[in-house]
Amino acid sequence: MPRLALALAVAAAAVGGRAVWMHASAEAPRAPVTFSDTIAPIVFDHCVTCHRPGEAAPFPLMSYDDVAKHATTIAAVTASRLMPPWRAAHDGPEFVGERRLTDEQIAAIAEWVRQGMPKGDPARLPPLPKFTEGWQLGAPDLVLEMPETFDVPADGPDIYRNFAIPTGLTEDKWVRAIEFRPGARRVVHHALFSYVRGGSTASLSRDGRPGFSGMMPVAFVPGFAPSGDLGGWAVGATPRFLPDGLAWPLAKGSDFVLQLHLHPTGKAEHERSRIGLYFTPTAPERKFREMGAPGLFGFLAGIDIPPGEKHYELKGTFNVFANMRAYAVIAHAHYLGKAIKAVATFPDKTTKTLLWIPDWNFNWQDRYFYKTPVDLPKGTKVDVTIVYDNSADNPNNPCNPPRRVQWGFQSFDEMGGVRFLTVAASDADEAAIQQMTAAVAKALANQIANSDTAKRLKEQQEQLMSKVGETSASPCGSVAPGNELFHPPTGIRK
Ligand code: HEC
């Protein structure tokens, strides 16, 4: 940040002559750091989007007093890079809207705290950023709203709740952006969007409250077709139009399914989210597809993590069978996920990291759009590794003591996958992809039917289906009395 560099340079020049008596040691002189000149610009640029009234963060950071009150914690969480939140490694590929402070900014915050948090000249305080009220992308073409309010108690376990909202569409549409507006911002941690055939999920609502519970990726359940994924939202996300004229298909007569991760705030909240859809009248030139590994979020990979296992690896490879271009990458795992990596090996044997999340946190599920889309020529191999920690040392482990964990839809089961939003590079590649996906779908249908996971799920189906609509009770099997409710940590801290 030029302003900071300038402030430090000027200040350093001013105190340079005093260095001799300030520190007899070889340490460089420390320039004064003030709130007005150095700290406010950092906080206003990188923190206020979430740390202001009505947004997700627990306290505002809008004035000297706000920041001074939390100064020591701020120094700690910026030094450890927990804040601003961003899970992808900063030395990996470059993504749009990356949240990150430079080393100099982090050092300046630490130095400001060390110097006793000088205020500086109030006249030099920069103005607070202006935030657009209402829809950030302008008036949507279609606004959907949860038909009823969902009540979230003051405390208790996190809640995963799905709401099927009829779109009322009488023709197929192409969606180029979705803007999500939670009603109670403090309580909604993240949201996933998809669509299913109208009315197909109705039987899943069984506990008398609006919606149905669980983490089922409804877009991938064959019985709900026509269906599809429509992206998602996480705290602090900036709504954007898809790049390069891309668009998601949305079938007529479908229900929009909103899956909310709700985190009780200490005060009873009433959530009623609204969703703005932005259509494009023309079909995109090429279809937008999600591909990756392991397939079906690890359904066929036989995830089976023994209790106490600190380092369980799930691996998968995505063999690129036509020339494609990847626009974005999405990673998924539940609470035991620890690290996620995807590396491409190109036909010429060079490699490139496509995603590296060294410290996965379920609460911060971003969709990462590449600054420059990545070309994946035919013959490229993308290797995905997901590491899980099912030991009692994992503070995010929903079960203590840990229990055996297998693939499943509930938050205390596991899944894992890295998927890329891709398009074919040419018409010939598009044709090859269509052919291949049809063949793969057929082969998969067989594999799924004969898989151990399917057999296990079938055995549990009665039990599972009777639970799907309910709030989960005792996920950890026999657990110590008083510990039977699943209390995932709020945790930005690990
Ligand atoms: C994308 C939204 C977002 C941004 C940007 C953001 N924060 Fe936060 N911050 C949060 C949320 C949400 C929490 C509460 C975390 C939780 O409870 O899981 C939080 C918590 C904190 C905490 C409390 C940590 C603790 O353990 O008590 C501090 C301190 C903090 N943020 C400082 C900052 C600073 C400084 C910046 C800018 C450099 C920043 N945050 C940017 C969303 C954000």
Image: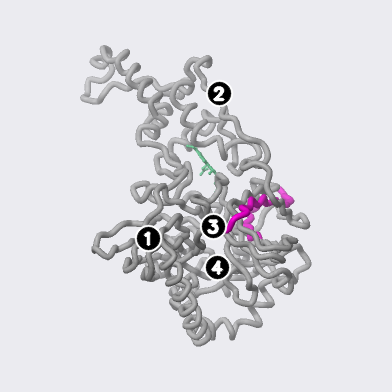
Task: Tell whether circle 1 marks a residue whose Cβ is less than 8 angstroms from ligand 1.
Answer: no
Please give the residue where the numbered disc 2 appears in the rendered image: 127
Residue 304 appears at what percent x and percent y? Answer: 45, 76
Please give the residue where the numbered disc 3 appears in the rendered image: 284
Between disc 1 and disc 4, the foreground one is 1
Identify the residue shown where x is 58% and y is 42%. 57
Depicted 454 relative to depicted 120: above or below: below
User: What amino acid does circle 1 point to?
Assistant: Lys
Identify the residue shown where x is 46% and y is 52%. 368
Please give the residue where the numbered disc 4 appears in the rendered image: 412
SS at circle 1: strand
Q: Are marks 2 and 4 in contact (CB under 8 Å)?
A: no
Q: Distance between the residues labelled 3 and 1?
A: 30 Å
Report the span colored magenta. 258-284
Q: Distance between the residues labelled 2 and 3?
A: 41 Å
Between disc 2 and disc 4, the foreground one is 2
Q: Distance between the residues labelled 2 and 4?
A: 45 Å
Q: Do the residues labelled 2 and 3 touch (CB within 8 Å)?
A: no
- Disc on the earlier residue, 1 or 2: 2
Between disc 2 and disc 3, the foreground one is 3
Task: Tell whether circle 3 marks a residue whose Cβ is less than 8 angstroms from ligand 1.
Answer: no
User: What amino acid does circle 3 point to?
Assistant: Pro
Q: State the mark number for residue 221.
A: none
Please give the residue where the numbered disc 1 appears in the rendered image: 341
Between disc 4 and disc 3, the foreground one is 3
Residue 287: in sight, yes or no?
Answer: yes
Q: Is residue 159 magenta?
A: no
Q: How many marks?
A: 4
Depicted 412 relative to depicted 93: above or below: below
Q: Is residue 264 magenta?
A: yes
